[in-house]
Amino acid sequence: MRVSRLLHTRYRVDDLERSIRFYREVLGLDEIRRHKSPRGSELVFLKAPGSDETIELCSFPASGPVQVQGDLTHLAFEVESLAGFASHLSTLGLSYSDGPHYKADGSGGFAFVDAPEGYEIELIQRSPAATGKETY
């Protein structure tokens, strides 16, 4: 038997409200639900407008401070324009932590911005001629 689809990805955070603000204000995700788990974790689920999968932000102070290991994991989101997103970041006092990097063939590019806990967020721009398959 196989799984049928990806439902959500969890990222544990120290400052839940600060992280929610980042994902909502910087990335434009929508908060779709919030609740406390049976073990006491505060959970918030967010979703990008064009996606079915969600991101679960989890605050569970009893497990100690979050220590994000460099280059261990990241979330990737598609954007219409890396330059336009850079302008958006600038209005919030932020900038890319890496990039943007564009493909020589003009099929798109990518850049990274760091979330509050240090998780990397990849932004991918595809050209209209791109096949839809990521090669980053």
Image: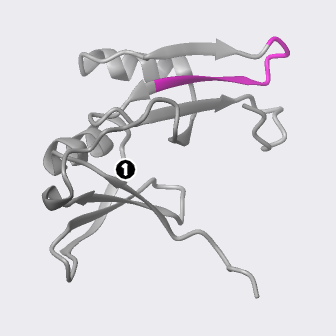
Q: Position of residue 54 (x, y in %)?
A: 45, 62
Q: Which residue is mark 1?
A: 29
Q: Dot 1 lies on which element?
A: loop
Viewed as shown, does residue 57 lie left or right of 130? left
Q: Nearer the viewer, residue 88 or 21?
A: 21
Q: Residues within 10 Å of mark 1 (few under 14, many from 20)?
A: many
Q: Is residue 130 magenta?
A: no
Is residue 60 shown left or right of residue 95?
left
Q: Amino acid at mark 1?
A: Leu
Residue 11's x, y, as percent? 37, 53
Q: Quadrant of residue 25?
A: top left
Q: Residue at x 42, y 35 (%)?
A: 69
Q: Is residue 103 above or below residue 69?
A: above
Indicate the colouring scheme: one colour
- Could you tell me which residue is drawn at 15 percent across and 74 percent down? 40
Identify the image quadrant of residue 114: top left
Quadrant for the C terminus, please: top right
Q: x and y percent of residue 130 in the render?
A: 81, 34
Q: Quadrant of residue 31?
A: bottom left
Question: Which segment did they paint magenta?
Answer: 104-112
- Image point 36% across, 43% down: which residue? 28
